[in-house]
Image (spheres, coloured by chain):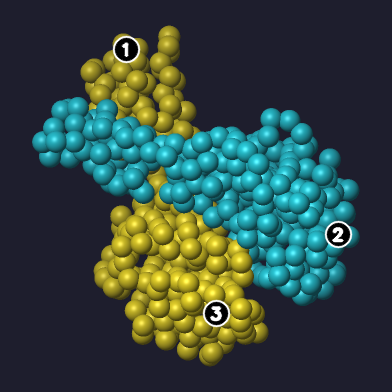
Amino acid sequence: MRVAVLGGKGGVGKTVISIALAHELGAVLVDADVTEPDTPAYLDLERERTVTEVRARYAVRTEDCVGCERCLEVCPWRALDDPVACDGCGACATACPEDAIELRETELGRVVESREPELNLRVVHPEVEPWAPELANIVHQMIPEDGDCVIDCPAGLGCPVIAALTSADAAVLVTTPEPAALHDYRRAQALARKLDLPTVRVLNRADSDDRGGFDVVIPEDERVLRAVLDRDPRGLVSALRERVRRIAALLP
Amino acid sequence: MRLAVTGGKGGVGKTTVAAHAHRILGWDAVDLDVTAPNLHLYLDCEEVERRRVHLLGPKVDPDSCTLCGECARACPAGALIVGRSWDFDPDLCHGCGLCVRVCPRGALDYVEIEIGEVREYRVRDTGSRLRSGRLNVGDRRSRHLVNHLLDRLEGDEILLDTPAGAGKEVYDALRAADAALVVTQPTPAAYRDLRRLLRVVRAADLPHVVLINMADVSERWTERIEREVDAPTLRAPRVDDPLESDELRDAVRAALDEL
Ligand code: SF4
Ligand code: SF4
């Protein structure tokens, strides 16, 4: 089974819950936050193999350019000659009447598979430049073909999150009690519904145990923060164990 | 000055800091976090207007179309397929307009494809405006909506609340700004994200300061950030009610002075 963990708002506890859930299920942890992959900040990872290299193209104007700027008219980002902004879509090259656009290949890094020895957790995570284009593609390449995995989604509900959800069999939706988190969580719920995914609804860092509308309530717990600061994965997993078992039991 | 407030890791306090900055400066604000827009929830404001945002995609006049397939070959998004009929998937279209330009028969015209909306609020205590982008749930074109907002910035005193992360949308927002206030926290993950975000800030080449929010949570990580980051850093304390806290407000003011 493939489980996506998402929340809309960042900082609600997706990554710690994903780590504990992957450990509980004996599943591979996939870090789908391509621009800001955090799992290496929580876990000491030993790199084992490269899953895939990540390359991209970016557009530059060559000396044949006559300055007509048709390229800028079709580029949604006015990204000519800027590899950080360019998507590599090639629209500019098609539009250029002088054949003066060159699409240059560039290496952006790789997706790797690592092992965390203390929990014996396998982790697939990106090591790519934050400006990598086509994030959805990278996410698809990170998800193992077979076997169970837990996909830790980035903040927001952008295309990498949609890519993770379209590959998943179930979603764990995480929020905290703050209004902004609940607002984004409602949008995450709508997205899961749209994609017809079964969900487990988790209220994290709850101030009280009796919040309705959630399947699992995780109370505020200083042990989690301490385990994060001390980079202590065992402490992290043990602080969350009981509630994460409930999440696991509710998955289809 | 156009000032971007950005944060890398979600939940470090970016939007809270943006709300304080807005109340200190009184400038119009733009919420660019279009898949999870919530600056309006941090400000006392009322909605005054709501507008749909569209891209322009193609529509065909079947009487003029000869099914030559030029448009489909030009489309960089794979949104057009031409076989025995002309087929267009609006969800995939990027609105570049190439198809309409290349059609040798002039058989294509523009049609609007909705991707989201912009809500405009009036903030009560400052009297200024907040414009908030809101992508339709499930739409993949967040960067288009971000750039829709960036292309329509008015005036020189604007506050930009960027999306989370460090990707191309964040870079677009930074490119449109003159300075950046970068918010972080003293945790291993936030610091890791900060270092990546600062590479994007440097690519956009603009002056910036780093505000370490909740600095007292970990003296060790705070000192490490101060020692290793190649930018001015300031501390903000952990407080009970961040939005109403005078201490946090003073820390944001100090960061703005530094800029
Ligand atoms: S390849 Fe696409 S994104 Fe890059 S500059 Fe050309 S039109 Fe713009
Ligand atoms: S506007 Fe651009 S992306 Fe959309 S269908 Fe036409 S060529 Fe394709």
| Left or right side of B41 for A182 | right
> Residue sitting at 78 percent across and 63 percent down?
A236
Residue at 71 percent of width and 47 percent of height = A115
Q: Chain of mark 3?
A: B
Q: Mark 2 falls within which chain?
A: A
Give the spatial CA distance, label 3 vs label 2. 32 Å
The span from disc 3 to disc 1 (Cα, nearest Å) is: 65 Å
* Residue under the point 88% across and 60% down: A242
Label 3 secondary element: helix
User: Label 1 amino acid?
Assistant: Cys
For the colour cyan, the matching chain is A
Q: Residues within 10 Å of mark 1 (few under 14, many from 20)?
A: some
Q: Is residue B143 visible?
A: yes
Q: Are marks 1 and 2 in contact (CB under 8 Å)?
A: no
Q: Position of residue A82 (x, y in %)?
A: 30, 47
Look at label 2 and name its amino acid. Arg
Quick one: B63 or A144, which is closer to the camera? A144
Q: Is residue A123 left or right of residue B153?
A: right
Query: Where, quadrant-wise, is the N terminus of chain A in this rendering?
Result: top right
Q: Residue at x 40, y 16 (%)?
A: B82
Disc number for residue B68: 1
The percent position of residue A203, horizontal first and vertical second, equals 76, 62
> Mark 3 highlights which residue?
B223
User: Outermost residue, left direction?
Assistant: A66
Q: Colour of chain B?
A: yellow
Dot 3 beta carbon under 8 Å from ligand 1: no
Q: Nearer the viewer, residue A77 or A245?
A: A245
Can residue B162 be seen by looking at this rendering? no
